[in-house]
Amino acid sequence: MHRRRWKAYLFLLPWLIGLVWFTLGPMVWSLYYSFTDFSLLQAPNWVGGDNYARMLTDARFHASVRVTLIYVAVSVPLELVASLGLALLLNQGIKGLAVYRAIYYVPSLLGGSVAIAVLWRQIFGPDGLVDKGLELVGVHVPALISSPGTALGTLVALRVWQFGAPMLIFLAALRQVPADVLEAAQIDGAGPVRRFFAVTLPLITPIVFFNLVLQVIGAFQAFTPAYIISGGSGGPADSTLFYTLYLYQRAFGSFQMGYGAAMAWVLLIVIGLFTLANFLVGKYWVYYEDGGRV
């Protein structure tokens, strides 16, 4: 028994080395650097909690927090509604379902890429497709990504466009809803809307919760679209200054690695708190057939 256990550890050794070398080790070092003035060019000096205290008076840090919270609060619900709506349509037994499913999943594969962010900039930028279209109908407005009032909206639209992955998960969940329960509700006189809200939606709440947690975490970590569309500046007027983008600017643009490490740990804690809050609130609306809880 003892020998078999050592064999198991031997097979796990490559994974354990990777975990320590590429994940746990860098995390410990970044935690240390968050309490220093490390700049990549000079040896780090211990500054205690100065990097964390600095965030309280950093106006651009506050702007990045505000932009990110708005982005998460708006984009996640819209993406979940869009993906669930399309999953309901695809669950109607239409022909060629596999083709539609593949087509709708493509945005999830490409949506976070640099190429699509560049394409998005061409569509909503000055002299872009949207700008030319509005001019044809006599509407002359500033380019959407050039106006502080609408720039963040284009990033929200890009996020919602990446509905493919949650849509597939919703579609799999809808296939598991018992047909006899839906037929019983129909016999009792429940229409399609009533059947959805009284039967289907409660039965798929665990999947809604799963998608909600994943999408919230992903939205907090969004970086590439804001970097490409704003040219790395977070403009105009810091309207697209995501938290991750400002972290990148401080750490790799200004070589303030200590401050960047502190921001990274704050982001990790915030994501953990949001996830914990989702689990605490989830027990009041997530339904499990076996009576289990989140």
Image (cartoon, rainbow, N blue to C red):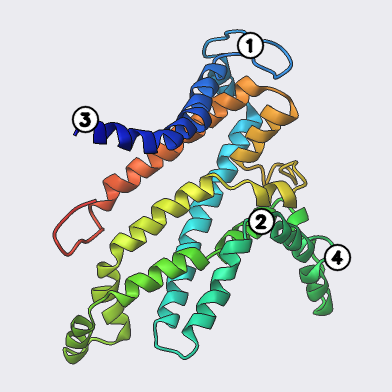
- Please rate how many residues cluster around mark 4, counting C-alpha atoms within 10 Å: few if below 14, some from 14 to 19, many from 20: some
Q: Earlier in the sequence, mark 2 or mark 4?
A: 2
Considering the numbered disc 3 on the image, is that residue within a helix, a strand or a loop? helix
Q: Which residue was labeled with disc 1?
A: 44
Relative to 250, say whether 258 is above or below. above
Q: How far is mark 2 from mark 4, CA to CA?
A: 23 Å
- Please rate how many residues cluster around mark 2, counting C-alpha atoms within 10 Å: few if below 14, some from 14 to 19, many from 20: some
Q: Earlier in the sequence, mark 3 or mark 2?
A: 3
Q: How far is mark 1 from mark 2, CA to CA?
A: 34 Å
CB under 8 Å between discs 3 and 1: no
Q: How far is mark 3 from mark 4, CA to CA?
A: 71 Å
Q: Residue at x 37, y 44 (%)?
A: 275
Q: Which residue was labeled with disc 2?
A: 113
CB under 8 Å between discs 1 and 2: no
Name the spot of residue 248 as percent of width and height, x first: 67, 34
- Please rate how many residues cluster around mark 3, counting C-alpha atoms within 10 Å: few if below 14, some from 14 to 19, many from 20: few
Q: How far is mark 3 from mark 1, CA to CA?
A: 45 Å
Name the spot of residue 78 as percent of width and height, x first: 50, 63
Q: Which residue was labeled with disc 4?
A: 127
Front tag of 3 and 2: 3
Name the spot of residue 113 as percent of width and height, x first: 66, 56
Q: Which residue was labeled with disc 3?
A: 2
Q: Earlier in the sequence, mark 1 or mark 2?
A: 1
Q: Identify the amino acid type marked 3.
A: His
Front tag of 3 and 4: 3
